[in-house]
């Protein structure tokens, strides 16, 4: 399956990505063309102290925010195949982090105050988690009000 985000890349960049697909560090300058807010990937440091040329463990946003992948990701094979796999690895990682953020949001008043919780997760996931939590609380309040509890809202 072709990598659908190639549509957003210029012809010159696409040719360079395809030609250098077996050398992932050479395609890093084009990640921002494929992924809206992604600037770079952090390659893991090997036991000998050198940086890996194809295994990454962290996404780095254009604003400098870093988000760890749930497990190290190895870029090997055809560039369009491993970029599709990278997209899925990023989705999986963000889903795990969002689930944890929502679980912790339930205990804002008890364990971690919201103003501290905000700094424990990536910003976009804080926004999404807050919206999910707000929607859930609003729905519960409306159901209580509908059930006759006048001070629920």
Image (spheres, rainbow, N blue to C red):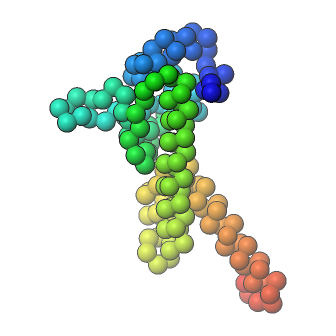
Q: Position of residue 17 (x, y in %)?
A: 51, 16
Above or below residue 23? Residue 98 is: below
On screen, residue 40 versus residue 153, left or right, reads left
Above or below residue 7? Residue 35 is: below
Q: Position of residue 37 (x, y in %)?
A: 55, 35
Location of the N terminus by quadrant is top right
Using the image as rendered, state which of residue 29 and residue 4 is in the foreground: 4
Residue at 49% from the left image edge and 55% from the top image edge = 97
Q: Is residue 44 above or below residue 17?
A: below
* Total numbered labels: 0
Q: Nearer the viewer, residue 84 or 10?
A: 84
Q: What residue is rendered at 54% in x and 72% in y? A: 106
Residue drawn at point x = 52 percent, y = 35 percent? 85
Q: Position of residue 12 (x, y in %)?
A: 57, 9
* 87 to the left or right of 135: left
Name the one closer to the observer, 25 or 106: 25
Q: Residue 6 in the image: state x and y as whole percent.
A: 62, 22
């Amino acid at each position: 399956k072709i990598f659908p985000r190639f549509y957003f890349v210029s012809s010159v960049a696409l040719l360079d990505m395809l030609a250098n697909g077996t050398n992932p560090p050479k395609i890093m300058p084009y990640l921002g063309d494929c992924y809206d807010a992604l600037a770079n990937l952090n390659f893991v440091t090997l036991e000998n102290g050198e940086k890996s040329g194809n295994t990454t463990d962290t996404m780095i946003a254009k604003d400098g925010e870093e988000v760890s992948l749930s497990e190290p990701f190895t870029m090997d094979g055809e560039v369009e195949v491993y970029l599709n796999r990278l997209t899925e690895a990023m989705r999986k990682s963000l889903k795990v982090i969002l689930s944890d953020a929502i679980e912790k949001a339930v205990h804002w008043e008890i364990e971690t105050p919201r103003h501290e919780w905000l700094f424990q997760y990536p910003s976009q996931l804080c926004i999404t988690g807050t919206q999910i939590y707000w929607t859930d609380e609003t729905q519960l309040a409306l159901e209580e009000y509908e059930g006759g509890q006048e001070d629920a809202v």
